[in-house]
């Protein structure tokens, strides 16, 4: 779905051009460019193609079914629909992204995006293969029920992803006063930080206002350099192992749970925590 829109030849040319420009800039500025990291990202991007096609088929079918039973259909030829749709998609994206960091079942997919040890434009293409299984996309279904045409939702999400490609860089680019309103490379670097100062912040897509509204905004600070990567995890270069690493650990933890209810609690708990099973507590007391 979004893959078909975001991988148009013209956009691909822009992506390739900017990636090469950034490689030159990083090498000239002494930052270096981790080739192993880049190859892992490319492996994940190639593996993501069939996953993205499957996503398009399944999520597209759910959106179409929702659209058929939606009580209202907002007109696509009215600019107000697009303004409201943009805000609605950004709002849904904020909660999708926040849930992807705070619920292990969703984090199992999203952690792949946070795994690179350096912030490059190319690393924005590092996405998990199990989006369908994590089911964070259900955050967008209410938009269709609310009357937004699935084509509008898909197009705005695709544009959101294109915008976010530009945020993945260590280049110090400031947008001035727009930094208050829009997500920027600086805000997104903080989002990718695995040091405690930056954990779980800046979930916005194009705009950063929902983070400011819901108390999850944190500014990047010069005295606290961002450390990229996953907290407590070594760098993994094998794309297949990386795509399933969090799932392996999550399923192992779920298997130790006594009963389905506790297994579900583990799946819904935040990353880095294991909720106490009541039977375990009873045994300990
Ligand atoms: Zn994230
Ligand atoms: Zn990112």
Image (cartoon, rainbow, N blue to C red):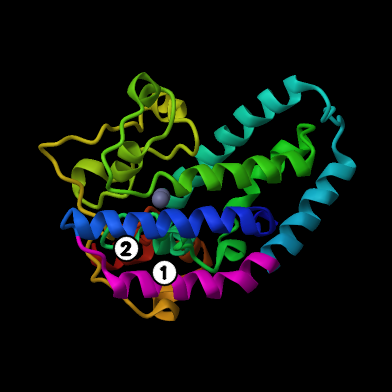
Q: Nearer the viewer, residue 133 or 128?
A: 128
Q: Name the residue under label 1.
A: 41
Marks 2/1 in contact by CB < 8 Å: the verdict is: yes
In the displayed structure image, the side of residue 44 where residue 152 appears, left or right = right
Seen from this angle, which residue lies furthest right? 68
Q: In which quarter of the image is the C terminus?
A: bottom left
Name which residue lies at 75% across and 22% down: 79
**Magenta stretch in the rendered image:** 32-53
In the displayed structure image, the side of residue 58 where residue 28 appears, left or right = left
Q: Mark 2 points at which residue?
A: 116
Name which residue lies at 76% across and 34% down: 148
Residue 89 visible to an observer of this rendering? yes
Is 37 contained in the magenta span? yes
**Percent x, y of residue 141:** 70, 44
In this view, 177 is above or below 184? above
Q: Badge 2 local density, few (<14 within 10 Å), some, or many (20+)?
A: many
């Amino acid at each position: 779905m979004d893959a078909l829109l975001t991988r148009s030849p013209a956009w691909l040319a822009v992506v390739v051009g900017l990636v090469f420009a950034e490689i030159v800039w990083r090498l000239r500025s002494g930052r270096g460019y981790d080739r192993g990291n880049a190859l892992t990202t490319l492996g994940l991007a190639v593996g993501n193609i069939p996953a993205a096609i499957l996503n398009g088929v399944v999520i597209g079918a759910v959106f179409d079914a929702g659209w058929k039973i939606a009580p209202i259909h907002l007109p696509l030829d009215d600019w107000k629909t697009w303004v409201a749709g943009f805000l609605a998609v950004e709002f849904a994206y904020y909660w999708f992204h926040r849930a992807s960091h705070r619920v292990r079942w969703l984090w199992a997919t999203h952690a792949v995006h946070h795994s690179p040890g350096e912030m490059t434009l190319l690393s924005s293409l590092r996405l998990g293969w199990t989006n369908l299984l994590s089911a964070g996309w259900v955050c967008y279904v209410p938009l269709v029920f609310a009357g937004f045409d699935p084509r509008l939702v898909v197009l705005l999400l695709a544009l959101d992803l294109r915008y976010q490609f530009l945020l993945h860089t260590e280049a110090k680019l400031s947008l001035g006063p727009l930094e208050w309103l829009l997500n920027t490379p600086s805000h997104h670097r903080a989002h990718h930080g695995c040091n405690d100062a930056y954990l779980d912040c800046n979930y916005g897509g194009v705009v950063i206002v929902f983070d400011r509204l819901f108390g999850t905004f944190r500014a990047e600070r010069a005295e606290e350099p961002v450390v990229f990567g996953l907290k407590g995890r070594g760098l993994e270069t094998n794309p297949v192992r990386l795509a399933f690493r969090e799932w392996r650990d999550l399923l192992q933890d779920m298997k130790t749970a006594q009963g389905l209810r506790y297994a579900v609690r583990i799946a819904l708990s935040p990353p880095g925590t294991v909720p106490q099973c009541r039977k375990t507590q009873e045994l300990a007391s």
